[in-house]
Image (cartoon, rainbow, N blue to C red):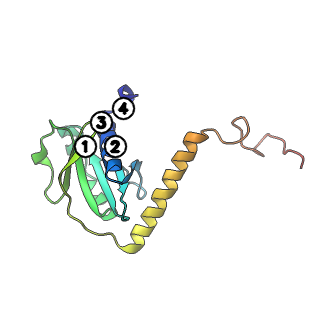
Amino acid sequence: MMEDLQPGQKLARGVSRYLRSLGYAPLEEFVPARGLRVDVMALGPKGELWVIECKSSRADFQADSKWEGYLEWCDRYFWAVDMDFPADLLPDGTGLIIADPYDAEIIRMAPEDKLPPARRKKLVQKFAMDAARRLQFLRDPVPGKDGLLLGGAGEETPDM
């Protein structure tokens, strides 16, 4: 499984494991709004929402021009990088997590900028729905009888 992951996905795995140990519920590749996709969104035990962007190289970081658009979708914003990443490239006023595929550690806590209540409610609901759909898909990847949706096109409706 690990050999199938991209470098950023390996960082996201370690970050997610670490966040779970802190009581957070992480969700990888979360879409808070159309056109945005964060590497990890984490819901904390007190309802706080963190965004963590995983950068595996200088080039990966320099190619990211959308990160500032993520700030309005979280209470705290972090970068997750490995030990070899030149951390001085990362902007001030953001958090820093050092990670590998197995674990992580917060090196610099991100400043808190609390979300407005209406946006928080919308995000928490979307987070829950996305997480529930992913869990259901793992349990039943092909819904319906024998992979066919009941009553679908070309299928006879059973007699009741």
Horizontal side, residue 17 vs residue 123: left or right: left
For numbered disc 4, what is the local secondary structure? loop
Q: Position of residue 72 (x, y in %)?
A: 31, 64
Tag 3: residue type? Tyr
Q: Image quadrant of residue 51?
A: bottom left
Q: Which residue is mark 4?
A: 5
Residue contact between numbered discs 2 and 1, judged by CB atoms under 8 Å: yes
Task: Rate crowding at label 3 as few (under 14), some (14 to 19) or many (20 or more) other CA atoms within 10 Å.
Answer: some
Residue contact between numbered discs 2 and 3, judged by CB atoms under 8 Å: yes
Tag 2: residue type? Arg
**Whether residue 29 can be seen here:** yes
Q: Which residue is mark 1?
A: 104
Closer to the eye: label 2 or 4: 2
Q: Position of residue 153 (x, y in %)?
A: 76, 43
Task: Identify the residue at horizontal 79%, vertical 40% (top origin).
Answer: 154
Q: Nearer the viewer, residue 110 or 62?
A: 110
Q: Which mark is residue 17?
A: 2
Q: Position of residue 122 (x, y in %)?
A: 45, 66
For numbered disc 1, what is the local secondary structure? strand
